[in-house]
C-alpha cells in the first residue's frame, strides 16, 4: 500500500478560522508523504451578476489578486509548518462542478471536505453539494463534520461497509487513527432481501480483521435501516454520534 495517497484536495474558505481545519489534513498528508492541494472556488455571479450568463468565469481582477494573496500566505505557512508540498489554486464557477473538474485534473486520490465551508444550495429539494460530491467523486472523500475550532484532533471516524471491504479507506486513516486513539464505527445498510444478511456479516467481519493490527482502537459495528438515500443515512448517523469525519467513496453509482 506504499504511496496509497499521493494528492489530497482541500477546498477552502478564506476566513480566519480555516487554519485550524487545515492542520489535521496537513498532518494526514505528511503521514502519507502526499501533496496537499488547496483550492479556493469563487462564484463570479456574486460579484458580476449581469455578466454571469455570458462569462461564467469572470471575476474582478482586484478581487482575484486579494484572494490569491491570502491563499499564498496560507500555502507558505502550511508548507513550512508541516514540511509538505502544498499547491494553491483559485478558480471561478459553480462550486461542485469546479471541484470535481479540479480533482480530476490533478488526479486527486482524496478529497477532504469541511462541511462548514460547503456552499448550501438555495433549492433544498435537490441534492446538497456534499451529497453530490460524495456520489460523483471518482476518488475517496473524507467529510469533516465537527467544527475544528471546538476540539483538537479527530476522535471518531465513521466508515460505511457496503458489499465490499474498504481496504483503501482503512489504510488511509489507520495510522492517524492509531496515533490519535480514534474510535471507529463501521456501519452498513440492512438489505431488503433477508438472504443477504450473512453477506453483511462477512464483510463486517473481514473489515474487523483488517483493523486487528490496531489493537488500541475501539471499533463498533452498526446496521442502519434500508433507505432510498444511503448517503443521507450515513451522514445522519455520523452526525448523531458526534463523529469528526465520514469516509466514503462512490463509484459506478454504488457506494464503496
Image (cartoon, rainbow, N blue to C red):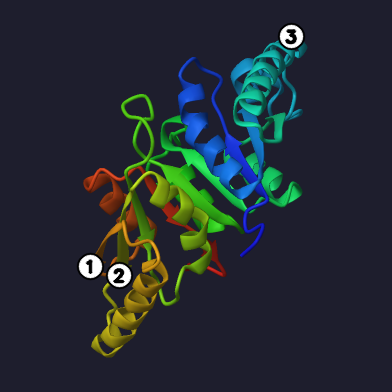
Secondary structure state at the residue bearing disc 3: helix
Q: Position of residue 108 (x, y in %)?
A: 67, 50
Q: CA distance from mark 2 to mark 1?
A: 6 Å
Mark 2 secondary-structure assignment: strand
Residue 164 placement (x, y as % from top left): 45, 76
Q: Which mark is residue 151?
A: none
Question: Taking 137 as reference, is 129 above or below it?
Answer: above
When asked about the image quadrant of residue 14, the answer is top right
Give the residue at mark 1: 225
| Among numbered discs 1 and 3, the one appearing first in the sequence | 3
Are dots 2 and 1 in contact, CB under 8 Å? yes
Is residue 109 depicted above or below 98 in this figure?
below
Q: Which mark is residue 62?
A: 3
Badge 1 element:
loop
Residue 30 vertical placement versus 18 (above, below): below
Q: Quadrant of residue 87?
A: top right
Question: How many C-alpha atoms fall within 10 Å of the one at disc 1: few (<14), some, or many (≥20)?
Answer: few
Q: Nearer the viewer, residue 210 or 163?
A: 210
Give the x, y percent position of residue 70.
65, 15
Amino acid at each position: 500500500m506504499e504511496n496509497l495517497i499521493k494528492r489530497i484536495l482541500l477546498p477552502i474558505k478564506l476566513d480566519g478560522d480555516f487554519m485550524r481545519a487545515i492542520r489535521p489534513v496537513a498532518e494526514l498528508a505528511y503521514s502519507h508523504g502526499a501533496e496537499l492541494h488547496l483550492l479556493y472556488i469563487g462564484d463570479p455571479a456574486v460579484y458580476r451578476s449581469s455578466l454571469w450568463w455570458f462569462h461564467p468565469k469572470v471575476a474582478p481582477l482586484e478581487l482575484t489578486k486579494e484572494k490569491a494573496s491570502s491563499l499564498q500566505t496560507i500555502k507558505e505557512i502550511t508548507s513550512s509548518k508541516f514540511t509538505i508540498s502544498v499547491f494553491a489554486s483559485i478558480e471561478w464557477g459553480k462550486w461542485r462542478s469546479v471541484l470535481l473538474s479540479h480533482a480530476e485534473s490533478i488526479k486527486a486520490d482524496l478529497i477532504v471536505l469541511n462541511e462548514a465551508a460547503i456552499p448550501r444550495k438555495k433549492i433544498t429539494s435537490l441534492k446538497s453539494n456534499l451529497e453530490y460530491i460524495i456520489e460523483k467523486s471518482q476518488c475517496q472523500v473524507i467529510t469533516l463534520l465537527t467544527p475544528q475550532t471546538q476540539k483538537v484532533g479527530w476522535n471518531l471516524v465513521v466508515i460505511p461497509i457496503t458489499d465490499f471491504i474498504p481496504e483503501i479507506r482503512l489504510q488511509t486513516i489507520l495510522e492517524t487513527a492509531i496515533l490519535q486513539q480514534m474510535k471507529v464505527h463501521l456501519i452498513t445498510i440492512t438489505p431488503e432481501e433477508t438472504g443477504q444478511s450473512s453477506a453483511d456479516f462477512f464483510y463486517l467481519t473481514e473489515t474487523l480483521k483488517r483493523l486487528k493490527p490496531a489493537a488500541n482502537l475501539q471499533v463498533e459495528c452498526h446496521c442502519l435501516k434500508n433507505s432510498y438515500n444511503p448517503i443521507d443515512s450515513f451522514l445522519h448517523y455520523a452526525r448523531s454520534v458526534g463523529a469528526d469525519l465520514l469516509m466514503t467513496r462512490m463509484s459506478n453509482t454504488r457506494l464503496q
